[in-house]
Amino acid sequence: MSVFLAGDVGGTKTNLALFDSEADRCELLCEATFPSSQYPSLEAIVQVFLGQAAVPVQRASFGVAGPVFGNKVSVTNLPWMVDAQHIQEALHFERVSLLNDLASIAYAVPHLVASDLHVLHDGSPVPGGTLAVIAPGTGLGEAFLTWDGEHPVPHASEGGHTDFGPTDRVQLALLTYLQERFDRVSYERICSGIGMPNIYDFLKDAGRAEEPAWLADQLATAADRTPVIAQAALDTAHPCSICEQTLDIFVSVLGAEAGNLALKVLSTGGVYLGGGIPPRILPVLEKETFRCAFLNKGRLSGVIASMPVCVILNPKAALLGAAYYGLNS
């Protein structure tokens, strides 16, 4: 058995796993999750993990939150510089590969099975067509996957940081509101975990919705307001209008930007929603709001309509993508 190390490295947590690289589908042997900020470097986490596993490893691949330049990554929201050459020398590995975390998810898509996906929009995917991935989590990540004739080729992107383009009067008012708070308004300022409270604040401050006292109390003590807002929006037993409106705007913006990405890379193979938020808001994503925003592309709406849209349910997609990428790079 040949053991291979893969990792999904983020600002909040780092997931590491060992795989049997001789198995047809990268058989998972063991895994562990570490709070990233409690360690001085990725090497330190890897040393702890391998010490626990007590298995010899010679190769490793890591999907890392941040753009990769020269096999180095300055990790988003962490004071780490991940350097593949340094890791290779420090841990005596034969080879270390790095790729962006969203590119890692994109690389995993061809290996996912039906149970890993939830279809939002049926289409007619083109075999070998480009795949697009958009992932609202803490931030908004984007990537895509092409084919070189035999192998998938992942491409990283920082598309989540492009300028926000409103598609209706409410979103135009939202943009104006946020321009008074930030120097620049990107899609990530709205369509992400850090962005959802911005929508909420706009609705409240602009007088478009009232904030219930019970919700104000919860939000005042919450370390992260986003889960509170999302949970209240999904509570059908006790509907909360301001949270429902927040999530509707969020989903509309996500649909529009997913369609933008699909047009930019011509993702005839399909569009995939990754990240931690989409699986948690499936009931709202299944409404017409997302689909209408996605398809509203004027003369090219017909082209967009042919592209299937799926939510990635497998929380280990980035980890699997890093493993497959490392084995084939």
Image (tube, rainbow, N blue to C red):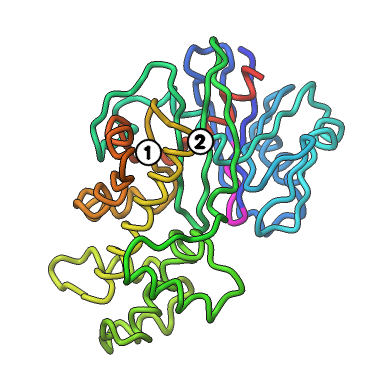
Can you name the residue that lies furthest to the front here?
299
Residue position for label 2: 105
Q: Which residue is drawn at 20% across and 66% down?
A: 235
Can you name the residue that lies furthest to the bottom here?
213
Q: What segment is highlighted magenta in the picture?
A: 11-16
Which of pointers 2 and 1 lies earlier in the amino acid sequence? 2
- Decide if residue 44 is on the left or right side of residue 63: right
Tag 2 secondary structure: helix
Q: Distance between the residues labelled 2 and 1?
A: 9 Å
Mark 2 and mark 1 residues within 8 Å of each other at the beta carbon: yes
Where does the image place residue 138, in percent across and percent down from the top left? 50, 58
Tag 1 secondary structure: strand
Residue 252 figure quarter:
bottom left
Tell me the kind of residue under disc 2. Ile
In the rendered image, which quarter contains the C terminus? top right
Answer whether residue 12 is magenta in the image. Answer: yes
Q: Observer-nearest residue: 313 or 51?
A: 313
Residue position for label 1: 312
Q: Residue at x 57, y 56 (%)?
A: 161
Where does the image place residue 207, in percent across and percent down from the top left? 30, 87
Residue 305 figure quarter:
top left
Where does the image place residue 189, in percent across and percent down from the top left? 50, 65
User: Which secondary structure dominates the residues rendered in magenta?
Assistant: strand
Where does the image place residue 97, in percent across and percent down from the top left? 71, 29
Tell me the kind of residue under disc 1. Ile
